[in-house]
């Protein structure tokens, strides 16, 4: 089961936070795609994967598609990931060379501020 919460900052920093809990795989990727499709016209998007123990190639594809849409709208994205296996996936695929992958929300905000 995948739980997705999307919230926007009230602090004037102009970011949206998409926080996932659970596995992102072929069975749950549709929910993730829908959540990302509902986030449009944002300056900054932070995708928090710190509670995602597993993501397959379908999940990675949805993640990349969502990032592409945000960037097409002149926004930028950072990812929070603290799971070793997920970090390996993001590093092995080269994902971490196109999007900042950080260990905390604060680090993600910093990375976006420097973009």
Image (spheres, helix red, strand yellow):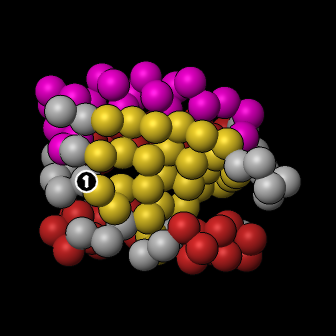
Dividing the picture into quadrants, the one containing residue 59 is: top left
Q: In which quarter of the image is the C terminus?
A: bottom right
Q: Which residue is drawn at 66% across and 30% down?
A: 40
**Badge 1: few (under 14), some or many (20 or more) residues near its Cα, within 10 Å?**
many
Dividing the picture into quadrants, the one containing residue 70 is: top right
Q: Nearer the viewer, residue 2 or 93?
A: 2
56 is within the stretch colored magenta: no
The answer to whether residue 13 is left or right of residue 81 is: right
Rendered view: 105 above or below 17: below
- Outermost residue to the front: 10
The answer to whether residue 81 is left or right of residue 41 is: left
- Outermost residue to the right: 12
Dividing the picture into quadrants, the one containing residue 86 is: bottom left
Question: Residue 30: where, in percent of width, then height?
Answer: 30, 23
Q: Residue at x 73, y 34 (%)?
A: 41
Q: Which of 16 and 74 is in front in this view?
A: 16
Q: Is residue 66 visible?
A: no
Residue on which the image places disc 1: 52
Rendered view: 54 above or below 32: below
The answer to whether residue 83 is left or right of residue 36 is: left
Q: Which residue is drawn at 43% across and 55% down?
A: 48
Q: Is residue 114 visible?
A: yes
Question: Residue 84: where, in percent of width, then height?
Answer: 20, 74
Q: In which quarter of the image is the N terminus?
A: top left
Look at the numbered disc 1 and give the secondary structure of its residue. Answer: loop
| Numbered range of the magenta stretch | 23-42
40 is within the stretch colored magenta: yes
Q: Which residue is drawn at 25% across and 35% down?
A: 2
Q: How many marks?
A: 1
């Amino acid at each position: 089961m995948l739980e997705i919460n999307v919230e926007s900052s009230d602090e004037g920093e102009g970011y949206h936070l998409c926080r996932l809990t659970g596995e992102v795989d072929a069975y749950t990727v549709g929910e993730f795609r829908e959540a990302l499709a509902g986030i449009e016209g944002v300056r900054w998007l932070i995708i928090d994967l710190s509670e995602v123990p597993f993501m397959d190639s379908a999940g990675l594809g949805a993640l990349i598609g969502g990032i592409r849409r945000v960037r097409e709208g002149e926004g930028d994205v950072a990812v929070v990931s603290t799971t070793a296996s997920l970090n390996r996936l993001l590093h092995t695929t080269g994902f971490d060379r196109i999007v900042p992958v950080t260990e905390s929300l604060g680090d993600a905000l910093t990375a976006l501020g420097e973009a």
